[in-house]
Image (cartoon, helix red, strand yellow):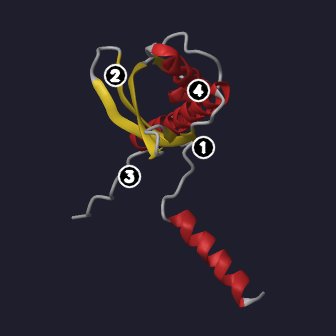
Amino acid sequence: MTLRTGALLLGLALLSACGFSPIYGHHTGSPAVEVSLSTIFIDAIDGKDGQFLRNKLMDRLYFHGRPAEPTAFLKITLSSTEVGLGIQKDATTSRSQLDMNASYMLRDREKKTLFSGSAHSVASYSKLTAQYGTLATQRDAYERALNEISEQIAGRLSLYYAERERPSVTKPSPQQ
């Protein structure tokens, strides 16, 4: 066995001893994160962009279909602004930057806030001479920003449930 292979095996052994566990794996004494995520009801989000974001989150969270009896409710507020960049001599812009924010709150059945946060994404697109081309690049920028926001929210919810459901480590009591 080479030194490199030995170091790799030692590293893997140390990694398993540090308490590392995959988010979506099965944990002793607690349900997997994917089970917890599939019990979240995602409230309707205003607008066409909100509908797109909700559909993306449903694809990410509902591993086994929509929850029959949800245990948590996710409310999301979406906002976006566009800024013109690349000002030309005739005072028109040749590029735009989209700044999108989503505030979210996870509540239980009793309306108690379990977890809240915000997600942010920036996307830009070129303004073309053809109007349809500009609309297509604008729509693509919105979809890229919404995809990023959905990934951020799903990841943070996964971490929330992974931390919340991690079995507590009990320290041995000192013997007297």
| Position in image of residue 104 (x %, y %) | 37, 28
Q: For the C terminus, which image quadrant?
A: bottom left
Q: Is residue 5 visible?
A: yes
Q: Which residue is mark 1?
A: 25
Q: Pointers 2 and 3 in contact (CB under 8 A)?
A: no
**Looking at the image, which residue is at 57% across and 31% down?**
138
**Looking at the image, which residue is at 70% across and 89% down?**
3
Dot 3 amino acid type:
Val
Dot 4 amino acid type:
Lys
The disc at residue 107 is: 2
Tell me the distance, in whole angstroms, between the alpha carbons under discs 4 and 2.
Answer: 20 Å
Outermost residue on the bottom side: it is 3
Q: Quadrant of residue 68?
A: top right
Dot 1 amino acid type:
Gly
Q: Which residue is mark 3?
A: 169
Mark 3: few, some, or many residues within 10 Å (few <14, many ≥20)? few
Closer mark to the observer between disc 4 and disc 2: 4
Q: Pointers 4 and 2 in contact (CB under 8 A)?
A: no
Q: For the N terminus, which image quadrant?
A: bottom right
Q: Secondary structure at mark 1?
A: loop
Dot 1 or dot 4: first in sequence order is 1
| Position in image of residue 63 (x %, y %) | 64, 26
Q: Nearer the viewer, residue 79 or 82?
A: 82
**Looking at the image, which residue is at 67% across and 75% down?**
9
Dot 1 or dot 2: first in sequence order is 1
Tell me the distance, in whole angstroms, between the alpha carbons under discs 2 and 3.
Answer: 27 Å
| Position in image of residue 118 (x %, y %) | 36, 36
